[in-house]
Amino acid sequence: MKIPWIRRSNLGVWTKIPLFEELSRREQQDVNAVLQHKTYKKGELVFQQGNPGTGLFVVITGSVDVQQEEDDGTILHLASAKPGEFIGELALLDDSLRTASAIAVDDTSVVALYRTDLLALSESRPRLGVKILMQLSQIVAERLRRTNRALKEVRLMADTASEGA
Amino acid sequence: MEEPTRGGLTVSQFLRGVLIAVVLVSAGWILYTIRGTLMPFGIAFVLSYLLIPVVDYLESHRVNRMAGTALVLVSIIGIFVVSIVTFVPVLVTGMGDMKDSILGNRPTWSCVIANRGWDVVRFTEVKISNADFVLDPTILPVELAPGEQDTISISFVPTSMTPTVATAVILGDNDGSDPLVLRLSGNLSEASDPLNFVPGKVKSLGAVQLALSDSAHAFGRVEPGYLMHFKMQIAALQPQMQKAFPSFENFDIAKRIGDFLQGAATEVLNETPALLSSVLSGMTFLVIVPLVLFFLLAEGRSIKRSLIEIIPNQYFEMVLNLLHRIDLQLGGYIRGMVMSVVLISMLSMLGLRVIGLRDYLVVGTIAGVANIIPYLGPLIGIFAGTIAVILQYSTLGWGTILPVVIVFLAVQLADNVFVQPVVVARSVNLHPLIVIFVVLVGSQMFGAVGMLLAVPLTAVVKVSVQTVYESLRSYSLT
């Protein structure tokens, strides 16, 4: 006999992304309550560059391409998100404009966590909010470190280039 | 092939515009038709904005959302019941008293005439010797078959406190020689009034025997309404007016103005207490509002989520953003509004109590609620205060009016210095002309309640439209 409320089935592939991996089972269920499931047809826009962002998307099935349109109109392919990967996480922090567009390259299903829901969740369950936001900060911090390193290398390269000249 | 154009629009654009207009108009019409049903939902919606922070707070302190909602609802219903039992009756009676003082309380006496004879009796006319006594509308002539009876109602509408005596002569066409006479008196002191203990009588009118339940009535002390004072004062000016403007000769200014004011005042004053009690005691409200409120509080988020789910992918991020912003603005506005109504009411009551105004509860409440209406609200408060002063001291002098005006000025100052800065979002800037316009439209459509709701509703619409507009500009819509 199945008793649904003690069934410990996996909540979904989204629990494996870094943002949520530290959460307890109970906390994952709370997050699950505010997640929104969405499906996109092949070629549909998930979000568009230049629009205010609303939240984070975790790809469940299918695939999403992230691409940036340059000022001169050329399209730069940045990344592809496969099942279990996430895009748009910076929109959880503020509603600044999206720096890239996301397009479904297959029929795709995602779960979305919106900033407003995350804020409401953090207000009603502060410990849970802190865990998610700490994870998010670590992701952002790691990326900043990587950028700094890259910048340093670029500078070094520029210096050696000017010394050689 | 190019589509044919009409004034720069393609036909399909034109048709789409017409379609949108038709949909909007019919939606508006449907909303207007079911406005009575919408009321409890609207009230629940507004209340949910007030209470969601409380439920959220409880939830953050590990109270289950259902339990928190139940707790909040039970407390609210408790407060509501207590206020109904204590405050509302005071308010309704207070407003009723004020109404009586302005319109006069118009005591009415009914006298039963029964035909105890064997012939048909006809009454054709009732002549009353003093205009302070008014025959209530009766269909004359009245025909009484043997054994039948009918009533004649007479109201006392005095113009002053002077003792008045009159006779009402009921004329019939059977026998004019000996008419039925009713004796009336008003504003006589009880001891000196000879009419206090006159029994009913049976009178023979020729061959016909008529029974009267009473043949006399003492109305006792009745204060003339303030409107009557006003009418008398204008009537006193009539001769001078006629001298100045001969064309007014056949124009009874006092009566015209009096009738107009009477009509307007009756409408506002009669409806308001009745409306208040009907709104508060209506079964639908007592059942539906808490029910809707419960679901909005406990499941508001999931309701919102399932609504968002219907939105097409192309628009949903934008709609989500809009909803969030409107939510913030509205929440701020509604919470701010209710808070300022409560604060202004309490401040006004306190001030009026200190200067010793008798009707401080009623006037304070009126001032607090009216404060919703910008520009006009404070004036309505002062107006209500002035009327209360007139009722209490029966004169209008600077000595009595000034304290009231000072109280309201102080309250306005406090509102501007302490309340408004805290209640930031309350200040939705509406142009004074728009305020006047929507207040008039509101009063025309829904009476006094419409006047009150006009500005908040307009503000809500303005905030929503403004947010939508501002946000849309940051979206590259195709």
Image (cartoon, coloured by chain):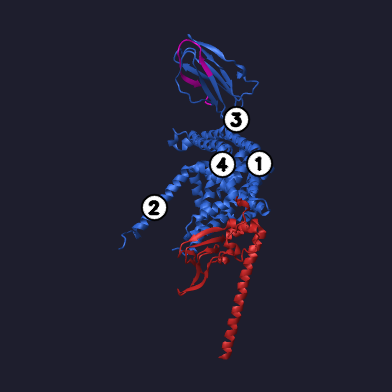
In front of the other: label 4 or label 3? 4
Q: Which residue is mark 2?
A: B19
**Can you give x and y, in whole percent of width and height, for residue B71 in the image?**
66, 46
Instruction: Return the residue nearer the eye: B6 or B226.
Output: B6
B121 in the magenta segment: yes
Looking at the rendered structure, the secondary structure element under dot 3 is loop
From which residue to which does the magenta span run?
Answer: B112-131
Q: Amino acid at mark 2?
A: Leu
Mark 4 or mark 1, earlier in chain: 1
Q: Amino acid at mark 3?
A: Glu
Mark 1 or mark 2, earlier in chain: 2
Query: Extreme front residue here?
Result: A1
Q: Which residue is mark 3?
A: B223
Instruction: Tell me whether circle 1 and circle 2 mark residues in contact (CB < 8 Å).
Output: no
**Which labelled disc corresponds to residue B78?**
1
In front of the other: label 2 or label 3? 2
